[in-house]
Image (tube, rainbow, N blue to C red):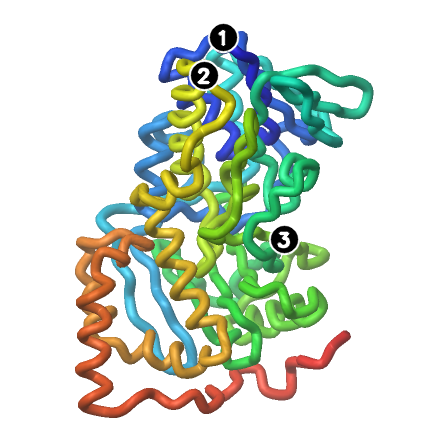
Amino acid sequence: MASVAIVGGGPAGSSVALHLLRQGVDPADLVVFDKAKFPRPKLCGGALTWRGTRALEELIGRPAGGGRTISLEFRCALGRFPVRERGEQWLYDRAALDDQLLRAVIGAGVEVRQETAVTSVEGLDGGWRVRWRGGTQRFDWVVGADGARGVVGRSVELHGGFVGRLVEAVYTPVDEAPDDSVLYFDFDPIGDGIPGYAWIFPYPKPGERGLWKLGIMDGRGVTTGRVLRQWTDAFAERNGFRRLDAKIAGWPERYFDPRARAHLPGLILTGEAWGVDPLLGEGIAPALEMGRYAAAQLKRALDQGVRRIEAYEAGFRATEEGKNLVFQGRLAKLLYGKGSHRWLRVLFGHEYMKELAAQGTQAYGRLQQHTWKLAGSYLRQVLRGGIPPNRPIPSTMGPQLETSAP
């Protein structure tokens, strides 16, 4: 069997490895590289959607620790409405979750080289040279699962979707805490000229209680880190939270673009190296599902003894997860584009959308199957009340926010 290097030991890389093993690949043919030593700090809200919860349970069961939520709430200055999924959503400290996923890979007999930072991958005749500080090794296949600015994609000039910016910190309630069975998604940043949303998630850090993660995503990467940090602290204060972290940390996030290439002969990208949900930045569920898809495609190529996977990108777009990411990208273009104030009014005024969201029969990110009904319902609302205006939505921060900060 051919040798496979998986660069990145997070959920995408672990998912690829575990699914390959399930399909009969010998663990001796796999090597996982990661620059960190697990468990390592990982900035992330840590919430899984219902479908992410199901994918994780199918892969390794229910990891130890963590918490659970039963619903989401979308809100902004225009109002709020509940979003209920088909079942509970698990919630984890990402350091603990990723460590348990990688330990499952190690426990299955795969060699995992932690604290080994891959610096480049270079094409060879019929293979790839993986280079890290202090060594090199030839592999037949390389899987790039190394994140938004991963070395694999940069080395071979596979440029995915655009990169946004997120910041986040740990907070504690000053007085009464919100309902910790709910994930709060706040779209007020749009009213302040930031193309994204903010979140308030309970944070189940092992050994501690009463912690929450608050942060903001700029879905276009156009707002400075200084402004995002300022906005987050003001948002926290307005919602009755006090920051515990000494500073608000930030990180990049790559969003899925259906036009992006993710395959060269003997090399594929998966997870955030390819792209995450462009609307809410959800990364865990797409990483697990992309890993499943990538493993299936790679196993087929290995069995056939070929180095090229026909229609790797198009094949993924035809999967349920791929259709979801394409649909979420369309919504993101509307909500974070030039007509953002109009489309935010559409979102919070769309009666059929809110009816679907409250039923508890749908899964977040699976509304693409209702496209025509949603469009028809919106058109009926337009005929009754006209097209929503794109005039600015009143800022929630007012003079607190220095939007011109350099």
Q: Position of residue 68 (x, y in %)?
A: 36, 45
Q: Is residue 257 visible?
A: yes
User: How far, Cα to Cα, is label 2 from label 1?
Assistant: 7 Å
Image quadrant where residue 121 sits: top right
Disc 3 target residue: 252
Residue appearing at x 73%, y 31% in the figure = 120
Q: Are marks 2 and 1 in contact (CB under 8 Å)?
A: yes
Residue appearing at x 34%, y 51% in the figure = 324
Query: Who comes first in sequence, dot 2 or dot 1?
Result: 1
SS assignment at label 1: loop
Q: Is residue 343 left or right of residue 270?
A: left
SS assignment at label 2: helix
Disc 1 target residue: 1
Please tell me how crowded label 3 is: few (under 14), some (14-19), or many (20+) other residues with Cα within 10 Å. some
Q: Is residue 39 left or right of residue 342?
A: right
Q: Is residue 203 visible?
A: no
Camera-nearest label, 3 or 2: 2
Q: 153 or 34, which is in the foreground?
A: 153
User: How far, Cα to Cα, is label 1 from label 3?
Assistant: 36 Å
Q: 120 or 344, which is in the foreground?
A: 120
> What's the residue type where badge 3 is placed?
Pro
Disc 2 target residue: 302
Q: 346 or 338, which is in the foreground?
A: 338
Image quadrant where residue 38 sits: top right
Query: Who comes first in sequence, dot 3 or dot 2?
Result: 3
> What's the residue type where badge 2 is placed?
Leu
> What's the residue type where badge 1 is placed?
Met
Residue appearing at x 61%, y 18% in the figure = 126
